[in-house]
Image (cartoon, grey):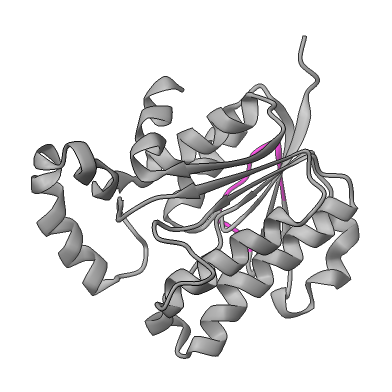
Amino acid sequence: MQKVRDALIVGASGLVGSHLLTLLLKSERYSQVISVGRRELPLIHPKLEQKVVDFDNLKQYAADLVADDVYCCLGTTIKKAGSKETFYKVDHTYVVQLAEITAEKGASQFLVVSAMGADAKSLFFYNQVKGEMERDVQAQPFTAVHIFRPSLLLGEREEHRTGEEIAAKVMKPLSGLMIGPLEKYKPVEAEAVAQAMLFAARQNQQGVHVYPSDEIGDMGKEH
């Protein structure tokens, strides 16, 4: 019988994170789910413990960041962040600090949402930041690191992202035509990403695992 574990999730108010939090609370794998964020979520559940933190001083909260499996769904856009510097801080610095702290506190698995095209050597700033984040997370001494690289995410957001909403309306009807080499560019439902993350954690693997967008969709179906 598998040991009941604790999960920690950061970014539970976001598109993928909100679906993932629901799955974690339902999962028999976890006896406790710790949600870490800038503010409390309007949710009460017997398994849920909420920690409100200042991400600019994350190390001050290290004693609260203790769990077996860590799920990171942090992410923003350059437009929302307001500058490249702030975007880098959210999508790289906060994520890597979370990995460093939780690894030091004994977490065995780190599961993070990245993006298709992530590459530390990319000429595109967004992809470069995501690639650097992946590289630095992999350097931490976890038993397993799982990196999810979805393409365009589908789902209802609390915030409006006009560009992504337009892209989703254009791309979703074309998904059926994206086969073969184009399959990896198909939009993926945020809920499928959340399902894939929990599925990956349950495999109790070792090492680094990177999941492209088309593979994420299949994992979601398997769950």
In the displayed structure image, the side of residue 182 where residue 204 appears, left or right: right
Q: Residue at x 66, y 64 (%)?
A: 95
Q: Position of residue 41 (x, y in %)?
A: 58, 57
For the question of whether residue 65 can be seen, the reply is no
The picture quadrant where one finds residue 216 is top left
For the question of whether residue 61 can be seen, the reply is yes
Please state, as top left, top right, bottom left or bottom right, where the N terminus lies in the image: top right
Please name whichever residue, 54 or 117, is drawn nearer the observer in this view of the structure: 117
Question: On screen, 203 above or below 146?
Answer: above
Question: On screen, 178 above or below 88?
Answer: above
Q: Is residue 43 magenta?
A: yes
Q: Is residue 151 magenta?
A: no
In the displayed structure image, the side of residue 99 where residue 192 appears, left or right: left
Of helix, strand and loop, which mostly describes the magenta segment?
A: loop
In the displayed structure image, the side of residue 142 where residue 148 appears, left or right: left
The picture quadrant where one finds residue 89 is bottom right
Q: Residue at x 63, y 67 (%)?
A: 39
Q: How many marks?
A: 0
Q: Which residue is most to the top?
A: 1
Q: Residue at x 36, y 68 (%)?
A: 159
Q: Position of residue 43 (x, y in %)?
A: 57, 49
Q: Residue at x 78, y 45 (%)?
A: 142
The picture quadrant where one finds residue 11 is bottom right
Question: On screen, 61 above or below 17?
Answer: below
The part of the chain drawn in magenta is: 40-49
Q: Position of residue 176 (x, y in %)?
A: 11, 37
Q: Position of residue 84 (x, y in %)?
A: 49, 87
